[in-house]
Image (cartoon, grey):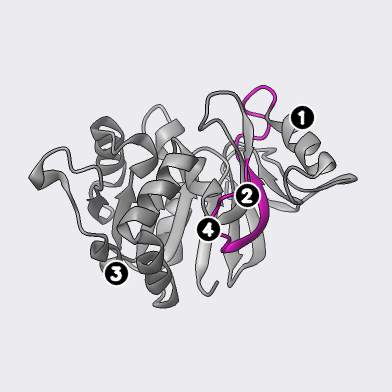
Amino acid sequence: MHGTIVTLGGGGFSMSDDGSSRLDDHLLEMTGKEHPRVCFVGTASGDSVAYRERFFTAFDGRAETSALVLFGQAAHDFTPPQILLEQDLIYVGGGSTANLLALWRLHGVPAVLEQAAVSGTILAGVSAGMNCWFEASSTDSFGPLAPLRDGLGWLPGSACPHYFGEEGRAERFRGWISEGSLPAGCAADDGVALVWRDGVLAEAVTERPGGQAFRVTADSEAPLDVRHLG
């Protein structure tokens, strides 16, 4: 996979009381633009209007904002995926990883995202928006936490967001990798993001002091160096 992908284990505007987030600030800075074009993708949340409005409020005045809407509950609500080719940053929200992948494939979104990434657009996402880029992930798309081996496969191995932020995430992720239900992968705590360039992990950053991320294999859990954005 060519291009830059930023995977947030949690945090960002959706987990902030006032919508402010150093991770989101960092994403805007990464575009290199004074007023970048940023598109929110809320597929995983069923294109929640409230979630979308939180995004617009958080990025108001700092970016030219738009949203990809696929559920099309009314004719004016549907947005063609080609809007993604016009962006500097694409921000994928959380929700159901399984539903996101199914609807994206139905509408041909992965091909458009890949074209955008090759052209220099930064792809980013939180929670389900982290999971989707990997080969596999830990998800609650089906109710209880479960392994999912149906990701886009643009990033290697498996992913686990909210590593210490939600009960049972860390233990189950380690267990699934140990038993072979998931391939080895990366885990990120809330407030931590992993920056990938051309499919290779470049760095890990955190908006919270002490934020952690790990490479997890069948026999080890190795901490990653995490830079505090301050």
Given contact means CB atoms under 8 Å apart, are the residues at marks 1 and 4 in contact? no
Residue 49 percent coordinates (x, y): 23, 34
Question: Is residue 162 one of those drawn in magenta?
Answer: yes
Identify residue type, mark 1.
Answer: Glu
Residue 88 percent coordinates (x, y): 34, 66
Inter-mark Cα distance, 2 to 4: 8 Å
**Start and end of the magenta stretch?**
148-168
Q: Quadrant of residue 10?
A: top right
Residue 100 percent coordinates (x, y): 41, 45
Residue depth check, mark 1 versus mark 4: number of the one nearer the observer? 4
Residue that badge 3 annotates = 85
**Quarter of the figure with the N terminus:** bottom right
Residue depth check, mark 1 versus mark 2: number of the one nearer the observer? 2
Residue that badge 4 annotates = 152
Identify residue type, mark 4.
Answer: Leu
Vertical placement of residue 8 versus 143, above or below: below
Asked whether residue 21 appears in the rendered view, the answer is yes
Inter-mark Cα distance, 1 to 4: 24 Å
Inter-mark Cα distance, 1 to 3: 39 Å
Residue 48: image tag: none
Give the SS element for disc 1: helix
Residue that badge 2 annotates = 136
